[in-house]
Every structure is written in structure tokens, then in C-alpha cells.
Image (cartoon, helix red, strand yellow):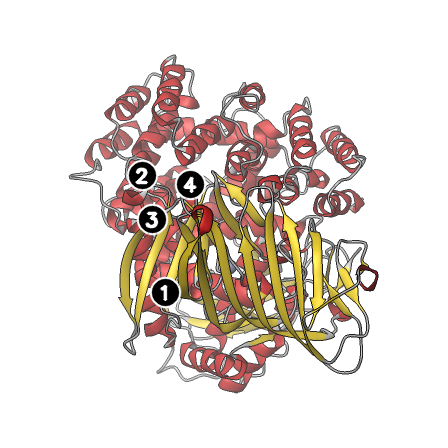
């Protein structure tokens, strides 16, 4: 059944207080819930959600309810008629954490208890109006076996503990802040705490703890540092302080997502907590900083102010991603962080906007809400907030945040409420801007130029168009802020004097606002024909076209804005690669492309991180996304050939960089060190493509030298992609060394799944039968199946259709085990519209095969049926 945003109705009953009691047991946990109910408006039945619960008994104001009064609803919920306007409803249910392979609700992982309630997991713990606009004060008592469950955690502050007969014990928690059910959490088991403290700006002492399995205590330092830095930054940037006596994090290795912001008790995928130099890459360290900050920032944007309904998800997610990106930019090299985030946006969100699941940042309907935790809601939502801040300015944005929180603290609100706060605080009319939340699809920005040398007049014409998306055939123009400058032929900045302006104060950079479908911007007083530098810092999430290769080459070499410099090089290379794909034949590394690569290497000393980004060719999927009908194998062949030619042409320079950029001392996780390793490993990767060179020898030596995981993995990547006989030994060695560390073993699977070798598909099929492959562990499924289908286009789209068949088999096996993960990994199969026949037909047939499975989950059903409906 499809849920529509317009159908929102306030709940019939509020639940002002919740008192929970858990008697934990692997297969027979008993949950007693006492709900303080208050009717909201006139007489109406009480409807409670419920799923996979066994009801034991119920009472109203202490009087047992006869079973006949409890109406069981089709989805598993309960309905009770004729309740008083105010009463206490008590239920007792039995649940089996051990049987819970969906990892939603209360489940077991490695013998320990964890919960995940967002979006609709609380209904798998007890009967409840499981919707975010019902906010309650919680007290929670947990009772368990002391020996197997020494640690008993829930939200809020500790409020007592004690012993019980039979080797059991209990602990009580009280959360003073009202919250929706999706923020409930319970963690219990044999975990150890890494502790620290934080003093807030007003002097509150907060006890910090990260709970992990014994043996992982030494791997929590980076997460703890990131947490303290986040707490400080939220105070400094927004004046927002933490509001409980304790802040706990628990790490779990079976987790559907990255992490979860439960009030006072964040639950994290171990991937975003644990890091040691020998086991975690630089990318893992950066991911930890980002995710720890993200979940911490939710305490205000998400928890204190929450969502009225799930259509408003981006209210908390887009805003919180914006806050974590802004934080990470402040912590390291802002420009490189920015372009990495843009790269990710274009890799994940642009295809979503162009595919069968395209939806606005604030969707209008859904079948399964878990399918809408998307790059659109998260990343595009963040870009929209970023644009709003650019439009009204940072001071007005800060006033808007203050106003938003002052107005809506402890409320469940809408995206309109957020925009209204920004509008009222800034005095800027944001009604047109709000279209960014309502329209799906990536706007296309096309530029044309006209220069009149005699008058020095330059006309920049900007036109926008958003392609139709499912359910939205016609689009309106959106306001697009275009941060820009003009360059002279020598690369220097030219003054920006718009027609009618004074010559004296012409700036070198300005922001044009394109509000209509097409607008001309006329600049005067130009001494020469300029080259426009547009969308500086990626000032809007749009696709830009219309600049020729000459302009792109000049911008890549000279633009002062690092984003435009990088982007222009990428666009230049993309255009060149598309031409080679179209032409067929042997690709040739042209002089323009070689010059861009050389210019990137010239920045090796001043900014190695940027040099690594600028030296890399655009990914195969990015190039494919620019084609109406993709040709994955041809793109792969072109890209590999260009990499080989770069390796030959720049061999001495790449070898020299590989020698010179080796870490001078012990591993350090700071921007310059990360940048050096990135460039050094990029050099190794391209060098090893050159036939007859010494790249493979270097890779073997780098692998054997061991040391940090970034370098080890980069070396192994090179070997695994090669024909070097040493590659099998290296893989076996890596497996033997790390088989007991699940996060490192995930890398072993991913490395093989994303190999460019032609036999990869067969390898992946064998790996799916490997004893270390476990379909119940989401990280392992993502590491093998997700990495292959989403990260290896040339092999996934093998002409035989075997890649499609493999993914369909995995989805069919996974759906009854963990439907959320199944619905996620199926996505690449729904992209058939951009494949040529007969591939597209095979993809459709595999989708049909999945759809025909009896008992298919509604999440997988939604993805597959929407995928097929796009004819
Ligand atoms: Zn979030």
C-alpha cells in the first residue's frame, strides 16, 4: 500500500509517558510497556502498531482487558475502542531477539543485545503508535543474566541498578527529554567501555563512553577524538550544547546502516568506530570522523527537533549531513573534502535522480520508508541547505538556526517550518527556493556566450531545464546560485562589472542567481574575451554543459577555485573519453589530457591531496552516466588504455613520487599525511599499468613491507588487478592474517569483487560460497554483493547476463533474511533503461523473476516494481 504525504493526520492519542521493563532472554524476552495515554481531540479508537509480537496480556488502568476487546489488525497491530480520554495501557509481549535476522527491533549480535528502531523498528519491540510525531518521556528497566550481560544500557541518564535472585541483575534509565519511538535504544551484553569526559561551555560534566567487545579498546581513539571535536564544534558554530549527563556509543558488527542517533545512546556499525593504523585505511578514518559527528549533531537536528512524519526525513538528514560536511571541511582541507563530497553526490545521487526511484528531497509517497534513506534525501538535501545558507549568508543562516530551535524545541515539525525560520530570520523570500524540496531530477544548466570585442561587452546566457521524472512530467525553474568569475587568456581574474554598475568596485567573484528558465548576464569593460569559471565550490547541485575543451583546459590549469579547476579537468577527460568510446578503435592519450595530468602532478608538493584527485580519470560509472545508453565494456577498455598510456608517459615521474612521498615517520592521520599517501598510491596504481615497468615490483614490496592498511591495501589492489603470479599468494596471506577481523576481511572480499580482471565474475560466484561469506551480516553482503554490482560496472554488466543472474539470486536469498539490505543491493538491476539490448532484456527478466517470488518483502517489491514500471 502506498502512503501519501497529503494523507497526514495527527494521532488520535498522545503517549505522554512510557515505562518499559525488559526481561532479556535470547528467544523469550518479555517486554512490559506502560503507556500514559491522552486523547487528542474527540472520541476515536486507539491504534497501535505491532509486528512479530506475541501478546501475553493487557490491562487498562490496572484492570485486565478481555481478549475480545483487542482487535488484531492485518499488519500485526492492535486496535482498542472506547478508551477513556486519559488512561494507562499496559501490555506484555514476548519476542525472540535470536530469530530477528532483519536487525530491526531488538536482536542479538555475537551474543549481545542491540536495537535499531528507525524508521519502524519499535513496533517489533512493543505495541505502540510508532510514528515520529508521538513524543514521550521514557523510563526503562532492563533485567538480564549478570554473567552474560554485565552491561545494561538505554537512553538518557542512569537511574539505579541492583541484584536479583538467580544470578540476574537490573538497571534503570530515565530520559528527561520527550522523544519519538524511533530514538529508543537498548544495548545489553558483554561489552567493555572506553571512557572520557567532556565539559560543556556552560560547565556541565558529561561522561563519555564507547562500548565495544573486549580486545577492541585500543581501536576507539579516533572515534572518541571525533566525538569531543564535534561536541566542541556544535557549541562554537551553533551555540548548541549537550543536554544529558552521559553520552554513550555502542558498536555492533551486525548493523543495517552506518549508525543511529538514539538519544544519549548512539549505536554504531563497528566500521564507523574501530580503527587502528594496521587495520583501517585513511578513508575509514575519515568516515569515522564524519559519522561520529553526524550522529552527534542529530542530538539537536533530529532529536530535540524531530520530524512530523517520514516524508520530512530530510529535515533532519539533509540538515545534519550539511552540518557534518561543514564540520569535516573545518577539520581538514576544505577544498579537497568538498570535491570528494561532490564526487560522491554525483556517483550516488545523480543516477538516483535519473532512475526509476527518482524522488524529491521531500518525497510525496512511499511504499517502504526504508527505501527512502537515499542519497537524494541525505546528500541532495544537504546541498539544498548549503545553497540556502549561501543565498541568505552565514549570519542570517545562524539566526535562522537559532529561531528554528527556539520555535520548535521538543516538537515534531516539517520542512516548511525549517524554511519559514530561515525566511523569517533573513527577510529573504524563500518560496521559490522551496521548489528544490519538491521537484525530483537534476537540473541541467547550459551556458552560451557572446563577446563583442569592440565594446568589451560579454553576455553570459544561462538556461536551465530539469528532465521529467516518474510522476513529475513538467518541471518549473529553480533558483540556481552560480558562484563565478571570469578568466583572461593568461588565466588571471578579470573584473566583474555587470551592465549599469560602477567600474570602481567590480569584484573578482560574484554569485549570479538564475531564477528563470533562461537569463542573460551582461558584463562590461572587458579587455579581452573571457573564459567563465562557473559553479565555484559547486554552488548548486546541477549538471553544467556548454563549455568547450579549450575553456575547460584553461580552467583546469589556472582557475583559482580548486573545485572548478578539478571539475574542469574531469569534464575535459569525460568529453575525451566519450569521444573515444563513440569512435571505437585504439584510444589515444591526447596532448590536452596529458597536459591536465602533468599539471596535476605539478601540484604534488603544494597540495598532494588535490593532485591525487586531479590526476585520477573520471570513474567508469561517471562516464556511463553521461551517455543516454551506456557501453560499460567500451568505457572500461578506454579508461584502462588511458591509464596504461599515462603510466608509460609519466613513468619516471610516478616512480619518483612513489619513492619520495613515502611516510617519513610513523603513521599519522592528518590532512598532509593522508594527501601524501593518496598521491603516492595513485602514482603506484597508474605506474603499474605500464607494461615492462617496475610498478608491480613496487607493489609487491609495498605489500610485503606491511605497515598501515592504506598502503597495504593500495598495493594489494594493484596486485589483485594484475596477472602477477604473486597476487594469489598475497590474497591468501592477507586472508590468513586477517581472517579474525571482520572489518578487514570485508576489504578482502571487496578487493576481489571490484577487480578489473576479466575473471572477476567467476571469482565473485566462488566467494559467495566461501565459509567466511555470511548472508546474515550486512557488512559482508555489501562487501561482496554490493561492491560487485554497484562498484564494478564492466563486470556486472558482462554481456552474458551472468552478473545480473548472480545479483538476482542473492536478492532472492537475502529478502527473507534481511529485506532492508535486499532492497538496497537490488538497485543496480533496476537501471536497465540505460543499457542496450539484449542486456536490458536480461535485466528485466531477472527483475520479473524476483517479483514472482512468493512472500517478497514490500521494500524489495517497491524497488523492483518501480524499476520495471519505467518502460
Ligand atoms: Zn542521519
The crowding category of the residue bearing disc 4, from other C-alpha atoms within 10 Å (few below 14, some 14 to 19, many at least 20), is some
Query: How far is the residue under mark 1 from the one under mark 4?
Result: 57 Å
Query: Which comes sooner in the sequence, label 4 or label 3?
Result: 4
Instruction: Please state the horizontal and vertical placement of residue 621, each as a whole percent of the image.
Output: 56, 39
Query: Which comes sooner in the sequence, label 2 or label 1?
Result: 2
The quarter of the picture where the N terminus appears is bottom right
Query: How far is the residue under mark 2 from the one under mark 3?
Result: 37 Å
Label 1, ligand 1: CB separation under 8 Å: no
Query: Which comes sooner in the sequence, label 1 or label 4?
Result: 1
Residue 532 visible? The answer is no
Residue at numbered disc 4:
592
Residue at numbered disc 1:
246
Q: Nearer the viewer, residue 430 or 589?
A: 430
Q: Is residue 316 left or right of residue 438?
A: left
> Which tag is nearer the camera, tag 2 or tag 4?
2
Q: Residue furthest left?
A: 665
The crowding category of the residue bearing disc 1, from other C-alpha atoms within 10 Å (few below 14, some 14 to 19, many at least 20), is many
Instruction: Please state the horizontal and vertical placement of residue 487, each as a whole percent of the image.
Output: 39, 62
Amino acid at each position: 500500500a502506498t502512503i501519501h504525504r497529503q494523507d497526514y493526520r495527527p494521532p488520535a492519542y498522545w503517549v505522554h509517558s512510557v515505562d518499559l521493563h525488559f526481561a532479556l532472554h535470547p528467544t523469550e524476552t518479555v517486554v512490559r510497556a506502560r503507556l500514559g495515554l491522552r486523547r487528542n481531540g474527540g472520541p476515536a479508537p486507539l491504534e497501535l502498531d505491532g509486528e512479530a509480537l506475541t501478546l501475553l496480556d493487557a490491562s487498562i488502568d490496572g484492570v485486565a482487558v478481555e481478549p475480545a476487546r483487542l482487535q488484531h489488525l492485518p499488519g500485526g497491530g492492535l486496535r482498542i475502542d472506547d478508551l477513556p480520554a486519559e488512561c494507562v495501557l499496559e501490555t506484555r509481549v514476548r519476542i525472540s531477539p535470536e530469530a530477528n535476522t532483519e536487525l530491526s527491533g531488538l536482536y542479538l549480535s555475537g551474543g549481545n543485545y542491540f536495537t535499531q528502531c528507525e524508521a519502524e523498528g519499535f513496533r517489533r519491540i512493543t505495541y505502540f503508535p510508532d510514528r515520529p510525531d508521538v513524543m514521550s518521556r521514557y523510563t526503562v528497566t532492563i533485567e538480564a543474566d549478570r554473567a552474560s550481560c554485565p552491561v545494561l544500557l538505554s537512553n538518557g541518564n542512569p537511574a539505579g541498578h541492583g541484584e536479583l535472585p538467580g544470578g540476574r541483575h537490573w538497571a534503570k534509565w530515565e530520559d528527561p527529554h520527550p522523544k519519538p519511538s524511533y530514538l529508543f535504544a537498548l544495548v545489553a551484553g558483554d561489552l567493555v567501555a572506553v571512557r572520557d569526559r567532556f565539559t560543556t561551555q556552560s560547565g556541565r560534566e558529561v561522561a563519555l563512553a564507547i562500548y565495544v567487545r573486549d580486545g577492541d579498546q585500543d581501536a576507539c581513539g579516533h572515534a572518541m577524538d571525533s566525538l569531543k571535536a564535534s561536541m566542541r564544534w556544535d557549541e562554537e558554530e551553533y551555540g548548541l550544547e549537550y543536554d544529558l549527563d552521559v553520552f554513550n556509543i555502542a558498536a555492533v558488527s551486525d548493523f543495517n546502516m552506518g549508525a543511529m542517533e538514539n538519544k544519549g545512546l548512539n549505536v554504531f556499525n563497528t566500521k564507523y568506530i574501530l580503527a587502528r593504523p594496521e587495520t583501517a585505511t585513511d578513508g575509514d578514518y575519515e568516515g569515522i570522523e564524519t559519522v561520529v559527528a553526524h550522529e552527534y549533531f542529530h542530538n539537536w537536528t533530529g532529536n530535540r527537533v524531530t520530524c512530523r512524519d517520514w516524508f520530512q526525513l530530510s529535515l533532519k538528514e539533509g540538515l545534519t549531513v550539511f552540518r557534518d560536511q561543514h564540520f569535516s571541511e573545518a577539520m581538514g582541507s576544505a577544498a579537497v573534502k568538498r570535491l570528494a563530497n561532490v564526487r560522491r553526490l554525483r556517483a550516488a545521487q545523480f543516477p538516483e535522480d535519473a532512475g526509476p526511484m527518482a524522488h524529491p528531497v521531500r518525497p510525496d509517497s512511499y511504499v517502504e520508508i526504508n527505501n527512502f534513506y537515499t542519497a537524494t534525501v541525505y546528500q541532495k538535501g544537504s546541498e539544498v541547505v548549503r545553497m540556502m545558507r549561501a543565498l541568505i549568508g552565514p549570519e542570517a543562516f545562524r539566526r535562522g538556526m537559532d529561531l528554528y530551535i527556539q520555535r520548535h524545541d521538543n516538537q515534531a515539525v516539517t520542512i516548511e517550518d525549517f524554511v519559514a525560520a530561515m525566511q523569517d530570520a533573513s527577510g529573504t523570500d524563500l518560496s521559490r527556493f522551496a521548489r528544490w524540496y519538491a521537484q525530483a531530477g537534476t537540473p541541467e544548466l547550459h551556458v552560451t556566450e557572446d563577446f563583442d570585442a569592440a565594446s568589451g561587452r560579454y553576455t553570459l546566457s544561462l538556461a536551465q531545464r530539469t528532465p521529467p521524472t516518474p510522476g513529475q512530467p513538467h518541471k518549473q525553474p529553480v533558483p540556481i546560485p552560480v558562484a563565478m568569475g571570469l578568466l583572461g587568456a593568461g588565466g588571471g581574474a578579470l573584473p566583474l562589472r555587470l551592465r549599469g554598475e560602477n567600474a570602481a568596485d567590480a569584484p573578482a567573484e560574484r554569485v549570479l542567481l538564475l531564477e528563470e528558465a533562461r537569463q542573460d548576464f551582461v558584463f562590461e569593460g572587458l579587455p579581452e574575451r573571457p573564459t567563465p569559471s562557473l559553479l565555484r565550490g559547486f554552488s548548486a547541485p546541477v549538471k553544467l554543459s556548454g563549455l568547450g575543451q579549450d575553456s575547460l583546459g584553461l580552467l583546469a590549469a589556472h582557475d583559482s577555485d580548486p573545485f572548478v579547476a578539478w571539475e574542469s579537468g574531469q569534464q575535459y577527460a569525460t568529453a575525451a573519453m566519450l569521444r573515444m568510446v563513440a569512435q571505437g578503435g585504439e584510444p589515444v592519450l591526447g596532448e590536452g589530457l596529458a597536459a591536465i595530468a602533468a599539471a596535476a602532478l605539478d601540484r604534488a608538493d603544494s597540495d598532494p591531496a588535490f593532485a591525487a584527485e586531479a590526476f585520477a580519470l573520471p570513474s567508469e560509472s561517471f562516464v556511463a552516466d553521461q551517455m543516454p545508453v551506456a557501453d560499460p565494456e567500451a568505457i572500461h577498455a578506454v579508461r584502462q588504455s588511458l591509464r596504461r598510456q599515462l603510466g608509460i608517459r609519466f613513468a619516471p615521474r610516478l616512480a619518483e613520487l612513489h619513492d619520495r612521498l613515502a611516510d617519513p615517520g610513523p603513521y599519522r592521520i592528518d590532512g598532509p599525511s593522508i594527501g601524501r599517501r593518496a598521491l603516492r598510491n595513485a602514482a603506484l596504481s597508474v605506474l603499474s599499468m605500464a607494461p615492462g615497468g617496475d610498478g608491480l615490483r613496487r607493489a609487491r614490496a609495498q605489500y610485503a613491507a606491511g605497515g598501515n592498511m592504506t598502503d597495504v591495501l593500495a598495493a594489494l589492489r594493484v596486485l589483485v588487478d594484475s596477472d602477477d603470479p604473486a597476487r594469489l599468494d598475497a590474497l591468501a596471506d592477507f586472508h590468513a592474517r586477517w581472517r579474525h577481523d571482520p572489518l578487514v576481511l570485508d576489504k578482502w572480499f571487496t578487493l576481489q569483487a571490484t577487480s578489473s580482471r576479466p575473471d572477476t565474475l567467476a571469482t565473485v560466484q566462488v566467494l559467495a560460497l566461501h565459509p567466511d561469506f555470511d548472508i546474515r551480516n550486512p557488512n559482508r553482503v555489501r562487501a561482496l554483493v554490493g561492491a560487485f554490482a554497484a562498484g564494478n560496472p564492466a563486470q556486472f554488466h558482462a554481456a552474458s547476463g551472468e552478473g545480473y543472474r548472480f545479483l538476482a539470486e542473492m536478492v532472492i536469498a537475502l529478502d527473507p533474511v534481511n529485506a532492508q539490505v535486499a532492497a538496497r543491493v537490488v538497485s543496480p538491476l533496476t537501471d536497465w533503461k540505460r543499457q542496450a539490448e539484449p542486456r536490458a532484456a536480461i535485466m528485466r527478466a531477472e527483475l520479473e523473476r524476483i517479483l514472482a517470488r512468493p512472500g517478497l518483502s514490500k521494500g524489495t517489491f517497491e524497488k523492483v516494481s518501480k524499476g520495471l514500471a519505467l518502460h
